[in-house]
C-alpha cells in the first residue's frame, strides 16, 4: 500500500510537470494575420503577457487592436494553479455574463460555454474546459457574425488546452 501511495505521488508530480509545458501562448496560436482576417482590417502588434505562478497558475492574456478605428480582439486563457481553491475556474465561469439578462449557452465547446454582450462593449465567448477558463471578446464586428467568428477562434485554441490533471491526481489519491 505504501509503495502504491509513493507511485501515485510521483505520477502526480510527473503529470503536473508535463502539463506545465503544455500551457499556450495565445498570441502564437491566434496570430496577427488571423486577427486581421477576423476583424477585416490591419491590426497593431499584439499586446499582452503570459504570466506563470510557481504553483502552476498560468494566464495568457493578449489583445489585437485595429490600426484605425475601434475594432478589437481580446483573449484570456487562465489555468488554475495546483494551490488554487477547488473549482476556481468553475466559480469564475459561473459569475461571468451580462450585467442584465441571461447569457446564451453555446454547445460543443469545452465543458460549458456562454455568449453575451459585455458592459465594456465586447461580444464575449467564455469557455470552461476542466480547470481552464477561456475568454474571447470582439468589438466592432457585425453582431450577426461575431459568434461564428469567435467559435472559429475557439476551435484554434481549445485543442491546445490540456484536460485538467488535478482530477487525475485526486482520483489516484482516493484509491
Image (cartoon, rainbow, N blue to C red):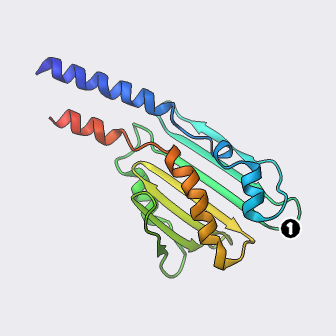
Q: Farthest residue to the right: give it.
A: 68
75 to the left or right of 171:
right
Q: Is residue 127 above or below residue 148?
A: above
Residue at the (55%, 56%) spot, across then down = 155
Q: Position of residue 143 (x, y in %)?
A: 66, 78
Q: Nearer the viewer, residue 75 or 38?
A: 38
Q: Quadrant of the C terminus?
A: top left
Residue at the (16%, 17%) spot, across then down = 3
Q: Quadrant of residue 60?
A: top right
Q: Is residue 48 above or below residue 94?
A: above
Q: Farthest residue to the left: give it.
A: 1
- The residue tagged with tag 1: helix, strand or loop? loop
Q: Is residue 101 above or below residue 139?
A: below
Q: Position of residue 100 (x, y in %)?
A: 53, 81
On the question of residue 55 being in view, the answer is: no
113 to the left or right of 145:
left
Residue at the (71%, 48%) spot, across then down = 31
Q: Quadrant of the N terminus?
A: top left
- Label 1 neighbour load within 10 Å: few <14, some 14-19, many 20+: few
Q: Position of residue 94 (x, y in %)?
A: 42, 64
Q: Position of residue 163 (x, y in %)?
A: 40, 44
Q: Farthest residue to the top: give it.
A: 3
Number of disc labels: 1
Q: Nearer the viewer, residue 12 or 31?
A: 31
Which residue lies under the disc numbered 1? 69
Residue at the (37%, 24%) spot, across then down = 14
Q: Nearer the viewer, residue 56 or 7?
A: 7
On the question of residue 86 being in view, the answer is: yes
Amino acid at each position: 500500500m505504501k509503495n502504491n501511495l509513493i507511485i501515485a505521488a510521483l505520477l502526480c508530480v510527473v503529470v503536473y510537470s508535463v502539463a506545465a509545458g503544455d500551457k499556450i501562448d495565445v498570441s502564437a496560436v491566434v496570430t496577427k494575420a488571423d486577427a486581421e482576417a477576423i476583424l477585416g482590417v490591419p491590426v497593431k502588434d499584439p499586446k499582452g503577457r503570459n504570466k506563470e505562478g510557481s504553483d502552476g497558475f498560468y494566464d495568457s492574456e493578449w489583445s489585437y487592436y485595429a490600426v484605425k478605428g475601434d475594432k478589437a480582439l481580446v483573449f484570456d486563457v487562465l489555468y488554475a494553479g495546483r494551490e488554487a481553491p477547488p473549482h476556481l475556474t468553475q466559480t469564475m465561469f459561473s459569475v461571468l455574463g451580462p450585467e442584465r439578462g441571461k447569457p446564451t449557452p453555446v454547445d460543443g465547446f469545452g465543458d460549458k460555454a456562454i455568449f453575451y454582450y459585455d458592459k465594456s462593449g465586447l461580444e464575449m465567448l467564455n469557455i470552461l474546459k476542466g480547470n481552464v477558463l477561456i475568454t474571447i471578446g470582439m468589438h466592432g464586428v457585425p453582431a450577426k457574425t461575431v459568434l461564428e467568428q469567435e467559435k472559429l477562434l475557439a476551435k484554434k485554441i481549445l485543442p491546445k488546452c490540456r484536460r485538467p490533471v488535478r482530477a487525475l491526481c485526486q482520483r489516484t489519491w482516493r484509491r
